[in-house]
Amino acid sequence: MGTPAYIHPNTEEINASLSRRPYVEQLAVHLVLKELDRATAKHPEFAQDIVHGAAIVCEEAGEVAKAAIDYHYHGGCVIDVSTEAIHTAATAIRLLINLPGA
């Protein structure tokens, strides 16, 4: 069985997919890609192996949960939830692009 097509889409597919998305989705993707660039520049080496990479994603997801709890129960700021969600998404992408065989 070959690699699924969604793993290696062509540029036209990517552009077409993004252009059909509502603006808020395009903005979310843009913010995640900006964070991906920032995080990669700050920490060029992602993780020493897949287990540590997954653990980093889980740690980021925990920060989203904490920000959501703070927002919901303690009057925290929704921007903190957004920021942590962006960090988590960028970290998950870093895991994906650093998987063996990626």
Image: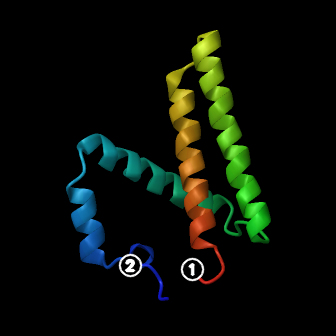
Q: Is residue 38 visible?
A: no
Q: Secondary structure at mark 2?
A: helix
Amino acid bearing label 1:
Ala
Asked if residue 66 is positioned above or below residue 97 in the image, the reply reads above
Residue 51, image x, y percentages: 78, 64
For residue 62, side relative to residue 84 (left or right): right
Q: Is residue 84 visible?
A: yes
Q: Residue at x 55, y 61 (%)?
A: 93
Cα separation between marks 1 and 2: 13 Å
* Visual colour scheme: rainbow
Q: Which residue is mark 1?
A: 102
The label number, if any, that marks residue 24 in the structure image: none
Q: Residue at x 58, y 46 (%)?
A: 87
Q: Which residue is mark 2?
A: 5
For residue 50, side relative to residue 9 (left or right): right
Residue 77, image x, y percentages: 55, 20
Q: Quadrant of residue 54?
A: bottom right
Residue 19, image x, y percentages: 21, 58
Amino acid bearing label 2:
Ala
For residue 22, side relative to residue 80 (left or right): left
Q: Residue at x 44, y 79 (%)?
A: 4
Between marks 1 and 2 in the image, the one whose residue lies nearer the viewer: 2
Residue 53, image x, y percentages: 72, 62
For residue 14, side relative to residue 83 (left or right): left
Q: Secondary structure at mark 1?
A: loop
